[in-house]
Structures are given as C-alpha cells and as structure tokens.
Amino acid sequence: MRITITQIKEMKQKGEKITMLTAYDYATAKIVDEAGIPLILVGDSLGMVVLGYESTIPVTMEEMLHHTKAVVRGTKQAMVIGDMPFMTYHISVDDALYNAARFIQEGGAQAVKLEGGVTVAEKVRRIVECGIPVMGHIGLTPQSIYQFGGFKVQGRTPEAAAKVLEDARALEEAGAFSIVLETVPAPLARIITEKVNVPTIGIGAGIDCDGQVQVINDILGSFADFVPKHAKQYAKLTDIIRKAVTQYDNEVKAGSFPTEKHSSSMDESLLAELAK
C-alpha cells in the first residue's frame, strides 16, 4: 500500500519529520523505497545529474515519463511524484491538465510537482479538482534561473519574503498537499511552516520545515560537477566507482580477470569432439 497525501498531511499534524529523495531509475528507486522513504520525487534535476544538461530547462515530458515509469516499477510503498518540466504547464490550463494527467496515466506517478506560487495557483486548483495531487515548489525555482540570474537565495528582503509567503498561501488555498521551499532563509521557512497547514519540504531552507528533500546524487556523492551548499555527502560514490573501474581495467589488461570462477564450463567429451 502506497503512502497517501492524507498520511503526509497527518505527519505535519503529529510533528513527524517527512523525508523525500529523488530517484531516476529502477534500481535506485527500489533501494530508496525499501529504506522506507515515504516520498520519491522524479525530479527534472535528472536533466543535470543524469542527462548532463547545464540546467533543468531542456528536460522534456518524454524524458520525464521514461524515468518516472522506471521509478514506479521499482517502488511499492513510496508516493512517486513526477516533476512537471519547463513550459509543460505555463501556457494554459489545458496544457497543465494534459501533462499532469500523462504523469498519472502513462508514468504511473501518484502526484505531480509544479514550480511557482501565485502565478500557477489557478492551474494547481484545476489539476487538484481533476483528482491529481499537487506538490508546490517556491523560493528558488530552478526553471526560472535565467530570471533569477543563477541559483541564488530567494526571500532575503522584506518585499521578497512577503512574496514567498504569499506564494505559499496561494498554493495552500489552491489545494496543494505540500510545498517545497528551496533556498530561502531558514527564519522565513520557519514562518511559512507555521502559517500554512500543509507540510513544507525544505531544501536549503533550514531545520524548521516539516520535511527535507535532497537530490540523491548529491547525498551519495555520485555527481562530481558541483556540490550544493545545502547537500551533505553521506557517501563518496564517485571515488568508490572510480577505484572499482580502475581495478577492473588493470585486471583485464593483466589477464587476471576473468578467472575460472567467472567463466562457464563445458562437457569435456563435447569439447574433445569439437577439437577434432
């Protein structure tokens, strides 16, 4: 039985911290699910950490659906959330409804995530009215990095902080079941968490959010291009993988791999017959 939005909302009411991680493939999703993580986001961050784009903006619906299907196949308990990519919900409500439905119908996800607050509130409302759970995302919204001038902290001035709070309230009113707060000052995240009734999920937003989300490649140390300030590396898989690959290369060149243990045997009488 998968985690439901009701259970996620109840976790806030009970004061239970909520954990969310990204996953982009079957094998990783299976591990994360078996570890008991309740929320798995198939983030458009895959554009950078899996596909090698410079930002999340080039990611397409087809790419998102491809990875969402793999993650869904690897999970049994976690709620899988599909991240709606750039310009798949901005143009019209019809576009937003169509693409959100694709995540549910084709991708097998149980919810979708949209970036933006007041500007997307009506689209969030319509998607929710169609029966699709929506997670909001405000603060630093990566699909708007060109407008922000890069990956910068949002909400530092009184005016900017008030806008982030307004965005949070608009999403709650529109029916979002939770809201990601990305790279906003911790005191502002605390105030928003206190003022909205739906769970807040922080990333670079301090300890007072109802939950936390991280890109799994960041916490595992498997993406070496850069490490965000908000990420803690619980492992350094890049070093482990490099060492394993180098050892494999050396053994192949030295003729010490494969050994008999790693090879298939053959009936000796048949072998003798073939050798004639």
Image (cartoon, rainbow, N blue to C red):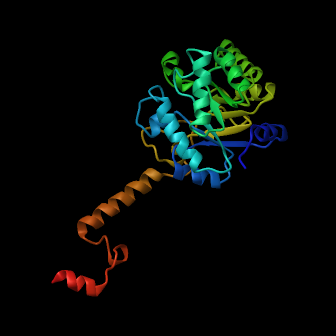
Kindly identify the residue that appears in the image at 66 percent across and 48 percent down.
37
In this picture, is 273 found above or below 147?
Answer: below
Q: Quadrant of the C terminus?
A: bottom left
Q: Is residue 224 left or right of residue 112?
A: left
Front residue of 114 and 231: 114
Kindly identify the residue that appears in the image at 68 percent across and 18 percent down: 121
Residue 189 appears in which quarter of the rendering?
A: top right
Which of 42/219 is in front?
A: 42
Most distant residue in the bottom direction: 269
Q: Residue 145, position in %: x, y?
A: 50, 21
Residue nearer the viewer, 133 or 197: 133
Residue shown at 28%/86% (left/top)?
A: 268
Residue 125 in which image quadrant:
top right
Residue, far top: 159
Q: Position of residue 31 (x, y in %)?
A: 58, 54
Q: Tally the numbered discs.
A: 0
Q: Position of residue 129 (x, y in %)?
A: 73, 24
Asked whether the viewer can see residue 250, the reply is yes
Q: Is residue 252 left or right of residue 223?
A: left
Q: Is residue 233 left or right of residue 261?
A: right
Q: Position of residue 253 (x, y in %)?
A: 24, 65
The reply to whether residue 179 is visible in this rendering is no
Q: In the picture shown, does residue 160 fall above or below 48? A: above
Residue sticking out furthest to the right: 14
